[in-house]
Image: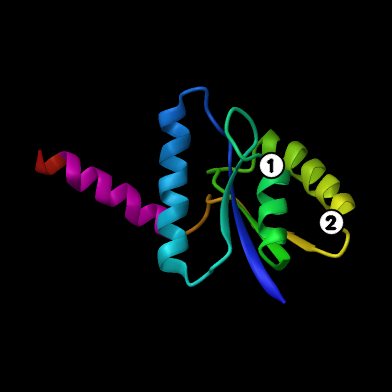
Amino acid sequence: MRTGIAVFAHGSAIESANEAVRRVVAGFAQTSGFDLVEPAFLELGQPDLPGAVARLVERGAGRVIVVPYFLTLGKHLQRDLPRIAGEISVIHPDVEIQVTPPLDGHPGLVAILADRAREALAR
């Protein structure tokens, strides 16, 4: 079974913010070893999560892992994402949908914070 990855971000009315997410997702696709990767947005960006999953399924995914590009488990991840994932499961009943935790708690965040602080000190 082929696995697709949907990187799920909030989305912004500022298109450059959505483009920044798309660039991160493109970099992830190039370096991760996953060949089926799509960005997805809750609102104000395209594609939305159902659209991204549809693209992944069209490309052969039988399982989709949704990776929230959110720092913490707020209302969108507690309320909206489970609802949307349930709706996708109805549309694609033969596709396994998995949702990972948000970025909060990942040890890489500590290194990122340290890098940003060092960058500021170097200026």
In the rendering, at what x and y percent does residue 111 appear? 33, 56
Quarter of the image with the C terminus in it: top left
Q: Which amino acid does label 2 sit on?
A: His
Residue depicted at 85% across the width and 45% down the height: 87
Residue depicted at 14% across the width and 41% down the height: 121
In the rendering, at what x and y percent does residue 16 appear? 41, 30
Furthest-front residue in view?
58
Badge 2 or badge 1: first in the primary sequence: 1
Q: Is the magenta stretch mostly helix, strand or loop?
A: helix
Left or right of 35? Residue 114 is left
Q: Name the residue under label 1.
A: 77
In the rendering, at what x and y percent does residue 88 appear? 81, 49
Label 1 crowd (10 A; few <14 / some 14-19 / many >=20): some
* Mark number, residue 92: 2
Residue depicted at 44% across the width and 54% down the height: 26
Secondary structure under tag 1 reads helix
Residue 9 within the magenta-colored segment of the rendering? no
Q: Where 45 falls versus 81 (above or below)? A: above
Name the one closer to the observer, 23 or 67: 23
Left or right of 119? Residue 95 is right
Mark whose residue sits in front, 2 or 1: 2
Q: Which amino acid does label 1 sit on?
A: Leu
* Callout 2–callout 1 Cβ contact below 8 Å: no
Chain part drawn in magenta: 108-120
In the rendering, at what x and y percent does residue 117 appear? 24, 43
